Image (tube, rainbow, N blue to C red):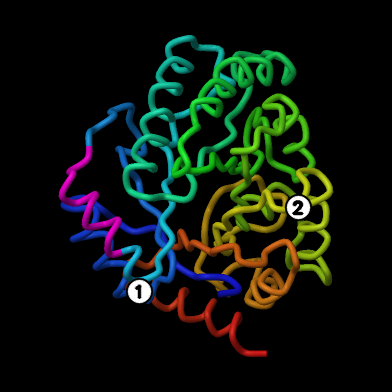
Amino acid sequence: MRNPVGGHVPVAGGLASIGLTYAREMGAEAVQVFVANPRGWATPTGSPAQDERFLAECAEEGLSAWVHAPYLINFGSHTEATVEKSVESLRHSLRRGREIGARGVVVHTGSATGGRPREEALAQVREHLLPLLDELTHDDDPDLLLESTAGQGFSLCSRTWDFGPYFEALDAHPKLGVCLDTCHVFAAGHDLAEPDGVAKTLDLLQETIGTGRLKLIHANDSKDVVGAHKDRHANIGQGHIGREPFRELMRHPATEGVPLIIETPGGKEGHATDVALLKELRDVR
């Protein structure tokens, strides 16, 4: 399929029983989950029965699975405890990703806190994140996907070219990829709504990271104008990006075979509407 379309699903109460039921009801062709509290440091063990069922049903229904790591992770932090917890948390997400058959684990690229130079923060990213990448030696280990931010504060990666120094810090590791969030990149200053804005942005991204590194797209419209540096998602076609850029996104060579995951407001009904709209934009020539 050119671009499977799906969404982030709730899993409290059962990865398969709750998460996949929700995914089916929204018409998802791909699914993203949390395997830990996204706003905490806990590293819970999964339910082997739910893991096995999730794996089997995803395979049976042709769903690709993706994990989003907790939001607190920041390898650029000046606080030693935060960095140590980030290592533990991301290692947990990567391990759980393998256990449930996820193709990738998405992690935010973080920020340089404490007033330190970006170069110093990136050196710390290298010190603590590269060993985690080197641990991904199993055939079924997920890729680690870097997700840039909307450019708030002292973000290490918000514009497409910021991925360059980040990839260099991690030796462009073969297990390293990118998850592009349309709301984030728009908020950071890439005008996806202008003529050829999507093509320009994707061309810049490929020039920076090379081909084949874009593995996942978070398809979210933006409640705020381009360059606002605000991470506020809107439903597809209901924000400042609009419908047409998402159609263009699914025509660009860089996105061939790349799934789209929505993280939009509106609950199950809103999610089903967004998934249906993206499928329509993809399928209607």
Q: Residue at x 56, y 43 (%)?
A: 145
Residue at left 37%, top 76%? 27
Q: CA distance from mark 2 to mark 1?
A: 31 Å
Under mark 2, the amino acid is Thr
Q: Quadrant of the C terminus?
A: bottom right
Q: Amino acid at mark 1?
A: Met
Task: Point out the frontmost of discs 2 and 1.
Answer: 2
Which span is picked out in magenta?
Answer: 46-57
Q: How many discs appear?
A: 2
**Along the polypeptide, which appears first: circle 2 or circle 1?**
1
Q: Are marks 2 and 1 in contact (CB under 8 Å)?
A: no
Q: Position of residue 209 (x, y in %)?
A: 76, 44
Kindly identify which residue carries mark 1. 26
166, above or below 18, in the image: above
Residue 199 drawn above or below residue 127: below
Q: Is residue 109 left or right of residue 197?
A: left
Name the foreground residue: 249 vs 172.
172
Residue 136 image offset from top left, x and y in percent: 50, 32
Query: Which of the 4 image quarters holds residue 87?
Result: top left
Name the residue nearer the viewer: 216 or 280: 216
Q: Which residue occupies the foreground of this view, 151 or 169?
A: 169
**For residue 58: magenta?**
no
4 with respect to 265 (left or right)? right
Q: Residue at x 80, y 65 (%)?
A: 199
| Residue at numbered disc 2 | 211
Residue that protrudes farthest toward the top in the picture: 80
Q: Position of 87 compared to 120: left or right?
A: left
